[in-house]
């Protein structure tokens, strides 16, 4: 018997009979209040900058974040009222990666935010844009409505469509080098601003 035949025989023996499927408990905690203060605490802990403002003040808040004349990439359905006159909006109509990376930042909406984990989820909707928008620019401004905030991950999953491209963001992009020094901006924005609307 060859080595190949021995290995294949062992694989067949290991797979026969097939193990019975295991029932996975699905009794997750699915309730709880959408605590905006908890979301803010978590986001701040992850080094995101949070601005709690009325929707009418979004453009003014962005003016305070970006320098005059900054260029920002925006998804096609971002509300125009959110854009201040002090920035140049670059609509993402299939911009190439170099154009996106050269922008000073990106402004998007969100699909849902999770208070327990301090996570903002984008699902590629027209007001959020392609996934690449959340990866290349050095600064990401994300606008979240209070009605989009849920308490926990199971609640968030009930609001998200599994076939959509989901991007889960918990603070600015960060990693650690071999000496455990935190390095931000390696595979995503170095700076995350979340504008939280009532």
Image (tube, rainbow, N blue to C red):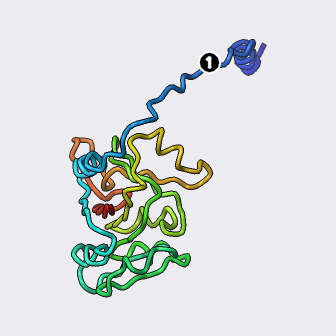
Vertical side of 127 occupied by 177: above or below: above
Which quadrant is home to the N terminus? Answer: top right
Instruction: Give the tally of numbered discs.
Output: 1
Q: Residue 93 at what x, y percent from top left?
A: 54, 78
Can you tell which quarter of the image residue 85 is in?
bottom left
- Residue at 24% across, 73% down: 65
Q: Residue 34 at what x, y percent from top left?
A: 36, 46
- Residue at 26% across, 42% down: 178
Vertical side of 180 occupied by 164: above or below: below
Q: Residue 71 at what x, y percent from top left?
A: 35, 81
Q: Residues within 10 Å of mark 1 (few under 14, many from 20)?
A: few
Nearer to the camera, 71 or 12: 71
* Left or right of 147 in this view: 52: left
| SS for callout 1 | loop
Nearer to the camera, 146 or 62: 146
- Residue at 27% across, 45% down: 38
* Left or right of 157 in this view: 196: left
Residue identifier under label 1: 22
Vertical side of 69 occupied by 101: above or below: above
């Amino acid at each position: 018997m060859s080595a190949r035949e021995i290995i294949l025989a062992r694989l067949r023996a290991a797979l026969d009979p097939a193990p019975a499927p295991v029932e996975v408990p699905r009794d997750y905690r699915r309730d709880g209040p959408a605590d905006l203060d908890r979301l803010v605490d978590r986001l701040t802990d992850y080094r995101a900058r949070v601005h709690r403002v009325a929707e009418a003040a979004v453009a003014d808040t962005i003016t305070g974040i970006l320098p005059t004349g900054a260029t920002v990439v925006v998804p096609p359905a971002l509300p125009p009222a959110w854009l201040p006159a002090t920035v140049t909006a670059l609509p993402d109509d299939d911009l190439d990666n170099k154009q996106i990376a050269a922008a000073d930042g990106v402004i998007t909406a969100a699909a849902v935010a999770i208070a327990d984990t301090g996570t903002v989820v984008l699902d590629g909707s027209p007001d959020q844009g392609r996934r690449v928008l959340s990866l290349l620019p050095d600064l990401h401004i994300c606008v979240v409505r209070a009605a989009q905030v849920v308490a926990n991950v199971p609640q968030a999953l009930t609001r998200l469509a599994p076939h959509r491209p989901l991007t889960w963001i918990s603070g600015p992009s960060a990693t650690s080098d071999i000496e455990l020094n935190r390095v931000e901006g390696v595979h995503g924005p170095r700076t995350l601003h979340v504008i939280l609307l009532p």
